[in-house]
Image (cartoon, helix red, strand yellow):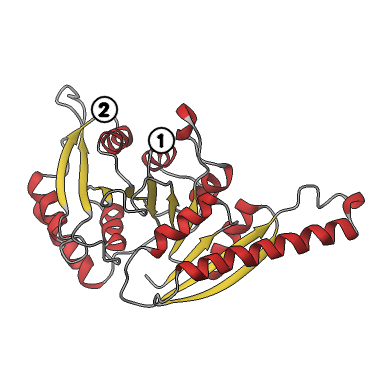
Amino acid sequence: MKSILLATDGSSTANDAARFLAHLPHDEQIELTVVTVIYVPGAQKTYLAGDWYETCLARERKLADKAFASVQEMFTGANVVLRQIVREGHPAETITAVAREIHPELVVLGATGHAGIARVLLGSTSDYVATHAPCSVLVIRPTGAVEGVHPLRVLIGYEDAGPAQAAIEEFAEFDWGAESNVRLISVCYPDRFFDAPPPKVSPESIQRAAAALHDSAPNAKGLLIESDHIGEGLVRYAESHEVDLMVVGETPRTRLGRVLMGSMTRYVLRHAPCSVWITRNRMIHGGKKKEMEEIGAHGA
């Protein structure tokens, strides 16, 4: 992965996203663009124009520079080239527009935290960006892994299909280390679902997929679970095993469907108690493509 867009407003959730990204070891140089959107409510009203508006803009630009300086400090010594973009506008729409403009491979941003039952809902900005961005998106929720409370726990939703295989390839571009607990989870329907098609993933197939991650995640293992709903099955596993990061692949979008998110992906994004990485509009490349095709062929 060579190009990442990090959205920040200097808030604690934005800083959580930056810290998570800064802790991901990588071999190749990354071009990291840090975008901050200045939004002044009522800025379009003529009676707010003048010195008041200019004062607000000047203050917000200083805060944007402070947020960028904080990100720079987090990435000190890393193989990263940083640049800053500051724009005025609606935060969600502007972040998405910048993503379309600079074509990053991944957009990273923090989720708005909620208490109690409401924690299953994302903030309006992260939800919009995750739904509308033209590339992969990583939405961060703090779980304690970055602070070293426990080794990183990762769940990768797996099936013998292109989106899931592309998600594995994207995930493998970072060195997750031997301590990370990585599980490839494939959900199949219970036996009582007589009209449901048989599961496409065999135990052997998912274990081979896990073995393909050995270089980046030596402890990766595959597991089949049962659930009436794929997204719910993944979320329940994440909850019961205190997962820090869930990785899922999304089917490439057509021109008419580019702003629509698959039902499973949407469910996971809005209900998972952890960070969610959505791999989107990515082709499987090179040797990895051949390797994953062989895995799928063996599992058919």
Q: Name the quadrant containing residue 123.
A: top right
Q: Which residue type carries mark 1?
A: His
Q: Is residue 244 above or below residue 255?
A: above
Give the mark nearer the N terminus: 2 vs 1.
Answer: 2
Residue appearing at x 63%, y 53% in the figure: 91
Answer left or right for 192 relative to 240. left
Nearer to us in this view, 30 or 116: 116
Which labelled disc corresponds to residue 167? none
Residue located beneath label 1 in the image: 271
Q: Is residue 227 left or right of residue 100?
A: left
Residue 283 can be seen, yes or no: yes
Give how far apart the Cα atoms at labels 2 and 1 are. Answer: 16 Å
* In front of the other: 117 or 90: 117
Quadrant of the frame with the N terminus: bottom left
- Residue 288 or residue 37, whichever sits in front: 37
Q: Secondary structure at mark 2?
A: loop
**Mark 1 and mark 2 in contact (Cβ < 8 Å)?**
no
Q: Secondary structure at mark 1?
A: helix
Residue 100 in view = no
> Mark 2 is on which residue type?
Asp
* Residue 232, position as x, y percentages in the image: 32, 32
Residue at which label 2 appears:
228
Q: Position of residue 169 (x, y in %)?
A: 27, 62
Residue drawn at x 20%, y 48% is: 183
Residue 268 at what x, y percent from top left?
A: 38, 40
Q: Which tag is nearer the camera, tag 2 or tag 1?
A: 1
47 left or right of 281?
right
User: Few, some or many C-alpha atoms within 10 Å of disc 2 (few <14, some 14-19, many ≥20)?
Assistant: few
Q: Quadrant of residue 199?
A: top left
* Residue 145 drawn above or below residue 187: below
